[in-house]
Amino acid sequence: MENTNHILRRQQYEKAAMSIISSTKTKTIIVLFLISIPISVLAHKPHIIDFRFPNLYPHALAWDPSAQHFLVGSHNRRIIASVSDAGVADTFIHDPSLPENVTVLGLAVDFYKHRLLVVLHALDPLPRFNALAAYDLRTRKRIFLSLLPTDEDEASAGTPRENANDVAVDFKGNAYVTNSIGNYIWKVNEKGEASIFSRSPQYTAHPVDHESPWSFFGLNGIAYVSKGYFLVVQSNTGKMFKVDEDDGTARLVLLNEDLNWADGIAIRRDGVVLVMSTTKLWLLKSQDSWGEGVVYDKIDLNVEGFATSVTVGAEDRAYVLYGHVDEGIMGKVGRESFGIEEVRSERESKEENVWIFVLVGLGLAYFLFWRFQMRKLMTNMDKKTT
């Protein structure tokens, strides 16, 4: 009887030990998985896409989440090209009915209406032309071509020609286009009906260095915020404005520094705003819905590539377009290769890595604690068995 109890007790101890060992193995696998996380994060390199499309000289960039590819607009070929993650470029839209040599300056994907919105502008010395075109993303057929109206007061005063530049779209399908020379914003509704939407004294209330070569270039990049307003940057002052969606009133966003020669703007899902010039990308945050904002990181861009646009692609990654548009403006031909490159914040990467290593440290501590407990229990079982 005593031997039977001894055997049963032994079997119970062995069962408990196997349970602990199995649990420990599981935790070991988890810890090894956690250790692999920082290695993969640290090994991640920015995504660089080199694509070939002779004489495209693209200025505008957008990401189509449904098709999972980029769209870029040509400087003077009436072409919008698609670019895959692997750098395969194809003609997406070719519209020969547009004026010859017209420039695609802005692109926006209307995800809810399945449309591509295209800002068109004719540079000097071509005849005046400022328009917004809408194309069906599935059929690639044009839905409308809306000529953007001239401000009669400015025209009678001899103000230089308008310059339609960038575009943003709200949830209802209304498009908003910046006028860089006139310093106002057009609105084009879903049917293609255009009007002047926002003309604010704020747009001309800040000093401009008229000795600068591009001093006449005002309102530029525009992005829609789902809370009911737009963020617009102004190139010649480096200012940012918050524009109300309902009445077009504008307020200056107070920043800790000017965004000199700001061009494009995009917004990540986490609310971080990306603003770029040809030489720099700024990352901004706000705690009060953009009454004030803070530049918390700056990244130098490749000057030779002449960056002109920024967008948010897959996995909330920031991409800039190196389209060498300066060469196209000067009339150069022959370039075949262009680039779309992911831009990463070193500061954000360091902060992410710190939290990952903290997580790994906690996992290791947990593992070592269980390992100690297992050894202690096994020792006690051996003593009792003996």
Image: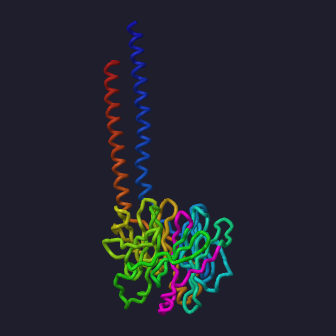
- Residue 85 visible (yes or no): no
- Colouring of the image: rainbow
Q: Residue 101, relative to residue 27: is it above or below? A: below
Quadrant housing the C terminus: top left
Residue 159 falls inside the magenta stretch: yes
Q: Quadrant of residue 343?
A: bottom left
Residues drawn in magenta: 144-173
Give the x, y percent position of residue 223: 47, 69
Residue at image position (35%, 51%) is 357
Give the x, y percent position of residue 287: 34, 61
Locate residue 219 relative to residue 95 in the image: left or right: left
Q: Quadrant of residue 109?
A: bottom right
Q: Looking at this view, is 155 or 51 the one in front? A: 155
Residue at image position (54%, 91%) is 124
Residue at image position (51%, 70%) is 168
Locate residue 312 relative to residue 299 in the image: left or right: right
Q: Residue 28, relative to residue 121: is it above or below? A: above
